[in-house]
Amino acid sequence: MDFTVFAQQIANGLVNGMAYVLIATGLTLVFGVLRIVNFAHGEFYMLGAYITYFIGTLLGLDYIAAAAISAVVVAGLGIAANRLIFWPLRRDHEFTILLSSLGLALLIANGGELLFGADPKYVESPSPTRSWTSAR
């Protein structure tokens, strides 16, 4: 196996692993602090990706600026979801909150597919001029 291919696979694995760590940390924080099993957590992650894509393509911003704006927008959506859906149910049974988060997850996932489409979208690389080469 070529070293360049091996190094690229290692880099891809680390990037995917970091994304999984971010998702797991968010789930752990939400459950640990609020005692809510939030099934819509992944859908908020999906919204952040779509918002980053559309801000980058429609406004022509670079990746870092689009991701920062997207993080603020998704944080606002998360706060709104907490205030409108989860906060009024805080004294109800845990199963009620669990079902409401499942309903929110289905609403966001299907609404996202309806609004954004099912075709994959690609975000421009933050550093398109740099590449890894093997030293031979």
Image (cartoon, rainbow, N blue to C red):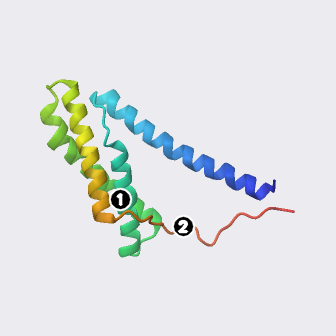
58 w.r.t. 17: above or below: below
Q: CA distance from mark 2 to mark 1?
A: 16 Å
The location of residue 14, given as percent across then percent down, is 61, 47
The location of residue 80, given as percent across then percent down, is 20, 47
Q: Which residue is tagged 1?
A: 70
Query: Which amino acid type is shown beneath numbered disc 1?
Result: Ser
Residue 134 got which mark?
none
Relative to the observer, which residue lies in front, 68 or 82? 82
Disc 1 residue crowd, few under 14, some 14–19, many 20+, Cα 10 Å? many
The location of residue 65, given as percent across then percent down, is 41, 64
Instruction: State whether residue 126 appears in this view.
Output: yes
Q: Which residue is tagged 2?
A: 125
Q: Secondary structure at mark 2?
A: loop
Query: Which amino acid type is shown beneath numbered disc 2?
Result: Ser
Horizontally, is 123 left or right of 58 in the view? Answer: right
45 w.r.t. 88: above or below: below
Q: Secondary structure at mark 1?
A: helix
Q: Residue at (45%, 64%) from the top-left corner?
A: 120
Instruction: State whether residue 59 appears in this view.
Output: no
49 w.r.t. 27: above or below: below
Q: Residue at (39%, 39%) from the top-left corner?
A: 26
